[in-house]
Image (cartoon, rainbow, N blue to C red):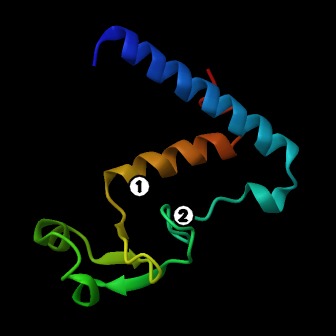
């Protein structure tokens, strides 16, 4: 990624962060509570917690070896797990939820 792309990416993150923080201030508290792994990112159906034995045929074996908890979408059969992307997103949401923390 060149410096222009990096600057654009950082600008977009900054704008997204500020928009969410503003929205978080505006909405009643019940709308501000983040609950991860409840909805499918593809089709928005409710996710179901599954053990690795139940979904091992749907996920690469190296992922099965690393994680024990999986979230399955019964509508589109997509499988999610709490990898590094999850940790980054949880940290991002935590920063947004605690107003002012992390705001540039």
Residue at 75% in and 54% down: 32
Which of the pair 98/88 is nearer the observer? 88
Residue 93 position in % (x across, y down): 58, 47
| Residue visible at 21% across and 73% down in the picture | 59
Foreground of the two, 101 or 73: 73
SS at badge 1: helix
Chain-order first, disc 1 or disc 2? 2
Q: Is residue 31 above or below residue 70?
A: above
Within 10 Å of disc 2 (Cα), the crowding (few <14, some 14-19, many 20+) is few
Residue 17, image x and y in percent? 62, 33
Q: Quadrant of residue 70?
A: bottom left
Q: Are marks 1 and 2 in contact (CB under 8 Å)?
A: yes
Q: Which mark is residue 10?
A: none
Where residue 45 sits, quadrant-wise, is bottom right
Q: CA distance from mark 1 to mark 2?
A: 9 Å
* Quarter holding residue 83: bottom left
Residue 28 x/y as whole percent: 88, 55
Q: Position of residue 6 (x, y in %)?
A: 38, 17
Question: Which residue is depicted at the point 44% across and 77% down?
Answer: 73
Q: Is residue 18 left or right of residue 36?
A: right
The outermost residue toward the bottom is 54
Quadrant of the image for the N terminus?
top left
Query: Which numbered tag is attached to residue 36?
Result: 2
Image quadrant holding the C terminus, namely top right
Q: Which residue is mark 1?
A: 86
Circle 1 residues within 10 Å: few <14, some 14–19, many ≥20:
some
- Residue, x 50% and y 46% (percent of image)? 91
- SS at mark 2 in the image: loop
Q: How many marks?
A: 2
**In the rendered image, the vertical position of residue 64 relative to residue 20, given as above or below:** below
């Amino acid at each position: 990624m060149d410096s222009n792309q990096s600057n654009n990416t950082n600008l977009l993150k900054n704008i997204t962060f500020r928009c969410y923080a503003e929205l978080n201030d505006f909405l009643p508290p019940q709308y501000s509570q983040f609950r991860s792994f409840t909805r499918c990112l593809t089709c928005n159906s409710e996710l179901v917690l599954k053990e690795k034995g139940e979904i091992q045929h749907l996920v690469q074996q190296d992922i099965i070896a690393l994680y024990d908890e999986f979230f399955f979408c019964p509508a589109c059969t997509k499988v999610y797990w709490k990898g590094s992307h999850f940790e980054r997103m949880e940290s991002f949401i935590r920063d947004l939820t605690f107003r002012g923390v992390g705001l540039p």
